[in-house]
Amino acid sequence: MSHSPATPSNTATQRLLKATRMLFAISAMAGTLAAQATSRTEPKPDWSTHDMPSQKGRIVLVTGGTSGMGYEDALALTRAGAEVIIAARNAERGREAIANIKQAVPEARVQFETLDLANLQSVRDLANRLQGRLPRLDVLINNAAIMSPPVRGVSADGYEMQLATNYLGHFALTGLLMPLLRKSDDARVVSLSSIAAGRASLNFDDLQAERSYDPFASYSQSKLAVLKWSIELQQRSDAAGWGIRSIAAHPGVAVTELIARGPGLDSEFGKQWAVERDLYHSAAQGALPTLYAATALEAVGGAYYGPTGDNEKRGPLGFAKMPPAAADRSNSATLWQLSERLTGVTYR
């Protein structure tokens, strides 16, 4: 049988067909996930902390719990009776957060642990301390993040700072805490993504932004990585019988210190934020998707929760839209294996 040589037009057509088939596959997978989500129990649109079941006897770790939504998570969970560990970099802010929580909840069981997610040795040190004294860990809330610093920073391990803080540090922490999580009767890992993930892609050719650094693109990529990892963690938990519910959430747009500490209030982004901030909701409202994922009996492993109004910037609680790049599992294993290599952490 003879074959005619490929012409430039034939090659272009084949590439177009391949790309079209890939887009259809991604759309189909996103549609399947959306269909699965709508067939599950929808959260009450007006769900609030008053709907939280008692968390008495539960042990919860919240990263970045000294301010913003992490603080609101810690406050609400202590009110519900949980023993809460706040893990963050600044010990002074940690003491202030604990004092404020105990003033609001005199019987609160809350403590502070030092953690720098951009330093993998710090992550290992925390995991070792907790394994030495906790009987188990029921909920891990991967909340801490930095957003769009104007100049590319590098972590203690040589990785781009946003990828290191928002994703790699949490990947490592979760893996190192797996033995404690697996001792829980209802272990949950709740990881914070962002609506920015919908505008992102994983650039494996320049994952660390060494050749070209765009602050917001790097932030978006880190939050897409969090979302893909959260879904993959649920798949692996199901396959291996780890018994963990891995759930992603995003806050919409909440008024926190993230802008001031990232691009800065004097930046163009910050100035626009200052004009629009009254349109968005509070840190306490932004924390609701996370708190639902961490406590609601109906919360589904592998799901993604967030506000559902105004392009998901705010509004009633519900299932968040899954970006096609997150639904596409074709490179999820690649991301996982790369993350293991970069962090030196293997899940067991």
Image (tube, grey):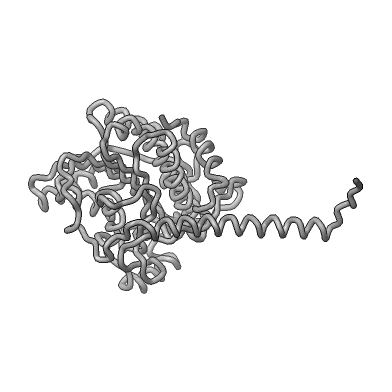
Is 253 in front, or is 32?
32
Total numbered badges shown on the rendered structure: 0
Picture quadrant of residue 258 = bottom left
Q: Which quarter of the rendering shows the C terminus?
A: top left
Is 294 in front, or is 17?
17
Query: Does the rendering let one see residue 8?
Result: yes
Is 12 in front, or is 208?
12
Q: Using residue 134 as the reference point, say whether residue 248 is left or right of it.
A: right
Image coordinates of residue 197 in percent, x first then y, are: 47, 57
Q: Using residue 120 as the reference point, say whether residue 127 is left or right of it.
A: left
Q: Height in image: 283 above or below 163?
A: below
Image coordinates of residue 40 in percent, x first then y, are: 35, 56
Q: Height in image: 305 above or below 133?
A: below
Query: Does the rendering let one see residue 144?
Result: no
Picture residue at 24% right of the left edge, 65% below the top: 46
Is 288 in front, or is 274?
288
Picture residue at 45% right of the left edge, 68% below the top: 268
Q: Using residue 2 as the reference point, say whether residue 112 is left or right of it.
A: left
Q: Residue at the right extreme?
A: 2
Picture residue at 43% right of the left edge, 41% below the top: 233
Image coordinates of residue 149 in percent, x first then y, are: 44, 54
Image coordinates of residue 324 in percent, x first then y, are: 52, 57
Q: Using residue 198 as the reference point, say whether residue 250 is left or right of it.
A: left
Q: Residue at the left extreme?
A: 106
Picture residue at 66% right of the left edge, 60% below the top: 20
